[in-house]
Image (spheres, coloured by chain):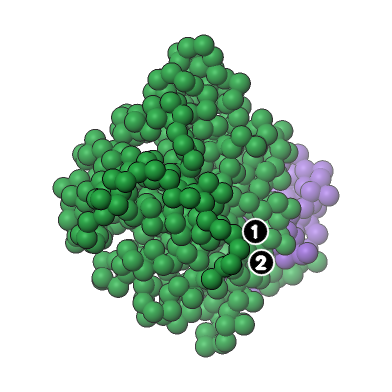
Chain colours: A green, B purple
């Protein structure tokens, strides 16, 4: 009855290799909270979140205890705020932040505008308020979609977001520009992403929904340690088997949370999400494959294999897979990435290449505080182009750390980690960004 | 059946099974299987139990066993069996 080997393997994964459920994210639709005044909408929003998410944290903690697996974050995602108000969105931001604190979640995502083709007045108001809101709220996360494969890239929005990121960095300068860590710019944003800062509930989602994000870079690394020197066929197979097991736990927890809360299960997000803890690093998986350091030649190929094998293993383990589903490569949240960046072995340009083969983009990267807005916009445009052409999600979450230069360090604490400030090309793209308009949607045939 | 795995990890000593089993008996918990092994250099005892007739739930059982673990200088975990089945069975 007891298969000792299996049980020990599970126990080892949890206790030694940092296997955890990264997040249970409760998506809450706020479309019908829209009212005649911003104050009334804010009250409706508060009431809806506070009542729907009332039992989320307690339920998460009880599942954690029963199954003996850590559930690191309990979060809420909501309908993009720009869709529920034409007035000033700031009171809604404060209401959401208060509601998040009241129900005890780690973060709440959805201070969001979707403007891949164009901006509504509400979108414009919302993005202009982002610096203030990121400065004056604690748990609210913001995301803006500026491009997609079907719509092309809204370069007016790209230009504006360069400025918004700079302003957010300056306003939160006293906290190492922390505001930018809660703000992400997307191309091909997904409607069911459980991960922050980019979680929101798309208009195609139900009234409320449970989405679960799994993790486990440490488990994959430990599995690969057993097949050192073997060919890539074995490497891929090992990752697939491991991803299957990790995802089965995610599916189990998702089903259990859905049943207990009486809220339908949406998806399991098959992402390898690192933490700054030792041995919980995506970079170290790539190095285990034979690279001296992440960032060197071979890195993109190694990451492509990893990302694909995780998906292949994971899809069979879950009823519904969605969200971002891929390996994350945030710099500040991954001990191996931090080390490689500090040693100058990992550049922004190599990270950009890596984002072409994995989820999700240039993530949690500290750049010099004097990087101008146009340069940030240029970085966003490049990432968006990779996403648009490859029909995948890409994102930019960079932190132009006020007053810092390459070689300095910024520290955000907790899961957000710390990051060395990485150098950015000083070649100007100001005239390119100043053009505005839209980059047309790409052709989806004649692929080369 | 409400199956759970009880794992006891630490330095091997006398009376581990006796003490845990006695407390389980008092809570009306049936032991289905027992096995012991060495895990990362630590003695590990694993018990599969059925809580169907127990007078408390998973968390309650864990709480009851904690003082025994403390007294033995060992860690005792109670986990629902489903997590092992999910991971290792298709």
- Viewer-nearest residue: A69 or A303: A303
- Answer with the quarter of the image where residue A58 lies: top right
| B54 lies above or below A131 | below
Asked if A352 appears above or below A437 in the picture, the reply is below
Picture coordinates of residue A373 (x, y %)? Answer: 25, 46
The residue beneath circle 1 is A247
Residue drawn at point x = 43 percent, y = 45 percent = A438
Label 2 resides on the chain identified as A
Q: Sequence-wise, which precedes: disc 2 or disc 1?
A: 1
On the question of residue A363 being in view, the answer is no
x and y percentages locating residue A409 in the rendered image:
23, 56
Mark number, residue A313: 2
Direction from residue A171 to residue A356 in the image, left or right:
right
Quadrant location of the C terminus of chain A?
A: bottom right
- Compare residues A1 and A117 and report the one nearer the observer: A117
Q: On the image, which quarter does residue A142 sit in?
A: top left
Please state if A261 lies on the left or on the right of A33 as rendered: right
Where residue B2 sits in the image (x, y, percent)? 79, 48
Q: Give the residue drawn at x 66%, y 62%.
A: A314
Protein chain holding label 1: A
Distance in Å between CA atoms under marks 2 and 1: 8 Å
Q: Name the residue located 24 percent from the left edge and 50 percent from the top edge.
A: A430
Q: Nearer the viewer, residue B12 or A143?
A: A143
Disc 2 is placed on an element classified as helix
């Amino acid at each position: 009855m007891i298969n000792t080997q299996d049980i020990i393997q599970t126990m080892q994964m949890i206790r030694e290799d940092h296997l955890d459920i990264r997040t249970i994210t409760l998506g809450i639709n706020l479309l019908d909270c829209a009212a005649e005044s911003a104050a009334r909408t804010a009250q409706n929003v508060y009431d809806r979140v506070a009542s729907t998410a009332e039992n989320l944290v307690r339920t998460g903690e009880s599942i954690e205890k029963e199954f003996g697996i850590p559930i690191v974050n309990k979060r809420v995602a909501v309908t993009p705020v720009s869709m529920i108000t034409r007035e000033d969105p700031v009171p809604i931001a404060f209401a959401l932040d208060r509601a998040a604190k009241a129900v005890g979640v780690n973060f709440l995502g959805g201070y969001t505008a979707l403007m891949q083709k164009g901006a509504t007045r509400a979108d414009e108001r919302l993005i202009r308020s982002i610096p203030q809101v990121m400065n004056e709220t604690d748990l609210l996360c913001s995301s803006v979609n500026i491009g997609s494969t079907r719509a092309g890239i809204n370069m007016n929005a790209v230009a504006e977001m360069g400025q918004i990121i700079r302003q957010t960095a300056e306003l939160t300068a006293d906290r190492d520009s922390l505001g930018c860590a809660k703000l992400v710019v997307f191309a091909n944003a997904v409607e069911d992403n459980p991960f922050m800062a980019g979680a929101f509930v798309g208009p195609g989602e139900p009234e409320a929904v449970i989405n679960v994000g799994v993790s486990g870079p440490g488990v994959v690394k430990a599995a690969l340690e057993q097949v050192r020197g073997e060919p890539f066929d074995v490497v891929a197979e090992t990752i697939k088997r491991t991803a299957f097991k990790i995802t089965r736990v995610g599916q189990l927890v998702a089903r259990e949370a859905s049943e207990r809360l009486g809220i339908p299960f949406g998806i399991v997000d098959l992402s390898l999400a690192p933490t700054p803890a030792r041995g919980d690093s995506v970079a170290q998986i790539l190095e285990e494959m034979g690279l001296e350091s992440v960032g060197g030649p071979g890195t993109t190929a190694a990451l492509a294999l990893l990302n694909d094998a995780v998906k292949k293993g994971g899809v069979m383990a879950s009823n519904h897979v969605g969200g971002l589903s891929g390996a994350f490569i945030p710099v500040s949240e991954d001990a191996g990435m931090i080390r490689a960046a500090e040693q100058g072995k990992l550049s922004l340009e190599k990270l950009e290449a890596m984002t072409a083969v994995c989820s999700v983009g240039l993530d949690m990267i500290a750049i010099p505080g004097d990087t101008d807005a146009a340069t940030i916009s240029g970085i966003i445009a490049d990432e968006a182009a990779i996403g648009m052409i490859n029909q995948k999600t890409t994102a930019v979450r960079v932190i132009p750390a006020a007053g810092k230069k390459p070689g300095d360090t910024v520290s955000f604490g907790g899961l957000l980690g710390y990051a060395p400030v990485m150098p950015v090309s000083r070649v100007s793209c100001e005239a390119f960004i100043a053009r505005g308009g839209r980059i047309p949607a790409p052709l989806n045939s004649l692929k080369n | 059946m409400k199956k759970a795995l009880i794992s006891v990890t630490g330095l091997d000593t006398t009376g581990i099974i006796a003490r845990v089993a006695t407390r389980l008996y008092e809570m009306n918990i049936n032991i289905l299987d027992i096995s012991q092994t060495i895990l990362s250099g630590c003695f590990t005892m694993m018990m599969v139990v059925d809580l169907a007739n127990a007078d408390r739930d998973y968390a309650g059982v864990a709480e009851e066993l904690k003082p025994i673990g403390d007294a033995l200088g060992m860690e005792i975990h109670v986990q629902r069996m489903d997590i092992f089945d999910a991971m290792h069975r298709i």
